[in-house]
Image: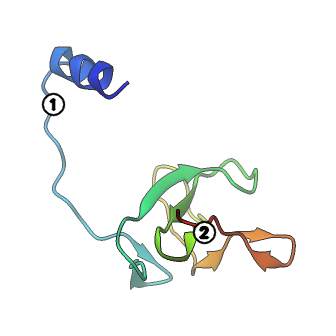
Amino acid sequence: MLFFTLAALAQAPTAELAAPFRVHAAGEPISTDVGHAYPRLHDLDGDGKRDLLVGQFGGGTCRVYRNSGTDAAPSFDKMELLLAGDAPASVAAS
């Protein structure tokens, strides 16, 4: 699958990328406890706006930053952990 992705990218037209920037939530830069973060955008609460989910290797938790803006101009709220029932959801690292 990785090979297919690299081959597809090699055939794609060249595009300019934007300069990197820090993503903020509730006015503060987002940072994780441990490296190896896995950010994804997904409409978690079904309101039509993509929220930011950040999976973390350390502790196996998933941080949720709800989007109170729009998809075109997101504004992420303070971090909350993804819950499984009343407890933080987690996946053990092996």
Residue 64 drawn above or below residue 19: below
* Quarter of the rendering containing residue 64: bottom right
The residue lying toward the viewer, choosing from 58 and 76, is: 58
SS at circle 2: strand
Amino acid type, residue under disc 2 in the picture? Val
On the rendered image, what quadrant is the N terminus found in? top left
Residue 2 drawn above or below residue 67: above
According to the picture, the residue beneath numbered tag 1 turns out to be 15
The residue lying toward the viewer, choosing from 33 and 9, is: 33
SS at circle 1: loop
Alpha-carbon distance for marks 1 and 2? 30 Å
Residue 42's disc is none
Circles 1 and 2, Cβ within 8 Å, touching? The answer is no
Image point (55%, 76%), residue name = 59
Image point (55%, 55%), residue name = 70
Crowding at mark 1 (Cα within 10 Å: few <14, some 14-19, many 20+): few
| Residue 70 relative to residue 1: left or right | right
Residue 94, horizontal then vertical, whole percent: 52, 62
According to the picture, the residue beneath numbered tag 2 turns out to be 64
